[in-house]
């Protein structure tokens, strides 16, 4: 009872902004699961801006090869299992990419507690606020940022899934949360719906450094960065002494063949700043503790999230490309029909 | 019994490389010490590359004003005291700048234990290896770098007073120490005299990134940086995951009106790097513990140092300018005649 799987693979490497022709939709016949294998039927998968760096052949060791499956997080249901740890019907999640089915030996597959995913916690949260983006916000802000009550926390891509969660956790910890986003609608969302103290629409300001200074009168103790480049440089000039810069993403850099980077490294000496990159998988053992705490915040209405769901695997590349044009609002997911 | 003091002040701000006309030698008559004051007669003061950033009117709050005394560390002898904590003849150190005499209320003055400064510990070490440069190496490497036995430590300006000490402490902690310096003579010094495992003469390599890779086959766990810019970028691309970058100085940036900075910020995410700026005064309370440990290493021949001493206050600006031309070898001090 083999199945026909459709999956998106890398057709060619983008040079700068990714385009539709960089992706190819393939059909493959998947055999029945072998010994210890399971067959997962996708319900949803994610399209993530951070995946952009995997498409380039720079020195990043884990770059995708042409013809390889595009990476993404999946939540799905076990359709058939020869692995004693899983049974048909189990709800599971893992990094199984942009495809309809996945065969796995069980490694890297997390079985979800289905009873947890009751309203307001939908199954999609397993690859959203309770998945990698939300965990990135949680461990980045709390472990690297070490927020103290009264700190000012500045967050770029504030309306995106990572930034929105980071800002709300900052508020839960008694901090002032100031967002940076690319439209008035996004700014209204983070201030009025998520409770940020302020938000800067960077497309409407001439001098971002001055705008940050205006909205952060006590300067910035923690900068949670998803953008990099000029925005990171503007934040550096507004940091308090001993400020922490959390490098969670760099959406302004992913599509550049020559990165811009930052100019203001001298401020690291004069203001004894610390800048640290985050890979959330380093915290793998603490995921359940973080998910339980965040689920509690969600259930009591103290932590909100928005998802941006497109239907149909065919649209995945366009949905991905749109991320770099700022068109998404919330975590972007593909519902597999 | 007033004294005539000669002192160097800022005449004009340098635009790029500092020049002799940016400095002016003034004479002033100093009154007798007032209540609680002491008069210090300088024996030596230091000319430091890090002082360059104090000459610029950028956003660094502590920039010197025109007409103000040029900053430097001094070791001297108390000539007269109205302060119960000090007596005539005491050996003292502090940040009293480029001048022959200093009047002080005693704040920021450290009284030295004269018995400590016996051969091989000369009085100059109080503003050298047991002063700010050596303490910078000590706390930067040990507290920010957290070296583990077997780590590879890369050090720029390896023949300078900070780098030379950092590399030797790395060796004392069981690490592989690889230097970067600007001449074969400097490289020979750090390898043959100080015991570094290797040294790259960056002026003789076409591709610094490749040269670092060649000399650091297990990649770099700790980069102790005194240079910034392109050299920092080349180091970033050679870091191991969870590598630590200690920003102690940025001699390549101080004289630029537009800083270069770094391009490779994406590596902070892919390799979860940490970059941190160091201000050694944050460790003020632990200075005696560090000085005692380093004095022990020096006395047993395990920690070496070189000083580059010019005689006469008149030559201080030229000695300072020469630092940026790489002409010094070891800590540069002025002996006050």
Image: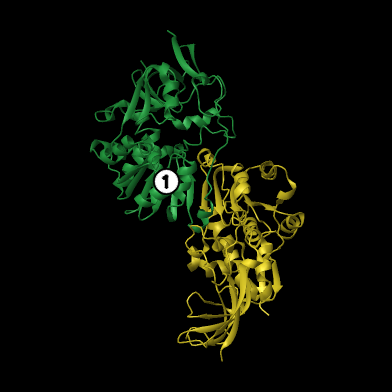
Chain colours: A yellow, B green
Q: Quadrant of residue B42?
A: top left
**B330 lies left or right of B119:** right
Residue B212 lies, in percent from the top left, at: 39, 49
Quadrant of the snapshot with the C terminus of chain A: bottom right
Residue found 69% across the figure and 72% down from its top: A315
Q: Quadrant of residue B308?
A: top left
Q: How many marks overall?
A: 1
Residue toward you, B89 or A125: A125
A277, above or below B70, in the image: below
**A40 lies left or right of B3:** right
Residue A180 lies, in percent from the top left, at: 68, 52
User: Which residue is farthest bottom?
Assistant: A1
Residue B334 lies, in percent from the top left, at: 38, 22
Residue B151 in sight in this render: yes
Residue B226 lies, in percent from the top left, at: 43, 39
Residue toward you, B226 or A171: B226
Q: Quadrant of residue B61?
A: top right
State the SS at label 1: helix
Quadrant of the snapshot with the N terminus of chain A: bottom right
Residue B37 in sight in this render: no
Residue toward you, B335 or B118: B335
Residue found 23% across the figure and 38% down from its top: B301
Residue toward you, A124 or A206: A206
Which residue bears the numbered disc 1?
B208
B19, above or below A47, in the image: above
Provide the chain ID for the residue under circle 1.
B
Q: Residues within 10 Å of mark 1 (few under 14, many from 20)?
A: many
């Amino acid at each position: 009872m083999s199945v026909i799987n459709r999956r998106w693979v890398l057709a060619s490497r983008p040079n700068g902004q990714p385009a539709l022709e960089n992706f190819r939709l393939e059909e493959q016949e998947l055999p029945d699961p072998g010994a210890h294998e399971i067959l997962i039927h996708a319900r949803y998968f994610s399209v993530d801006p951070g995946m952009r760096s995997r498409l380039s052949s720079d020195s990043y060791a884990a770059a995708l090869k042409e013809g390889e499956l595009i990476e993404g997080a999946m939540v799905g249901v076990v359709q058939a299992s020869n692995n004693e740890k899983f049974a048909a019907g189990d709800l599971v999640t893992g990094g199984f990419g942009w495809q309809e089915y996945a065969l796995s030996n069980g490694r890297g597959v997390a079985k979800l507690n289905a009873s947890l995913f009751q309203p307001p916690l939908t199954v999609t949260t397993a690859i959203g606020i309770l998945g990698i983006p939300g965990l990135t916000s949680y461990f980045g802000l709390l472990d690297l940022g070490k927020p103290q009550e009264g700190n000012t926390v500045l967050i770029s891509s504030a309306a995106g899934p990572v930034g929105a969660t980071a800002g709300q956790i900052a508020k839960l910890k008694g901090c002032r949360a100031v967002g940076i986003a690319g439209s008035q609608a996004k700014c209204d969302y983070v201030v009025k719906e998520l409770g940020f103290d302020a938000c800067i629409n960077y497309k409407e300001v001439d001098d971002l450094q001055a705008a940050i200074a205006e909205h952060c009168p006590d300067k910035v103790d923690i900068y949670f960065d998803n953008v990099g480049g000029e925005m990171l440089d503007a934040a550096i000039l507004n940091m308090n002494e001993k400020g922490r810069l959390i490098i969670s993403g760099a959406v302004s850099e992913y599509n550049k063949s020559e990165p811009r980077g930052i100019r203001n490294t001298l401020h690291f000496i004069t203001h004894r700043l610390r800048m640290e990159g985050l890979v959330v998988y380093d915290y793998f053992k603490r995921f359940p503790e973080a998910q339980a705490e965040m689920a509690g915040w969600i259930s009591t209405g103290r932590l909100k999230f928005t998802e941006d769901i497109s239907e149909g695997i065919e649209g995945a590349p366009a949905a991905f490309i749109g991320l770099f044009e700022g068109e998404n609002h919330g975590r972007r997911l593909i519902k597999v029909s």
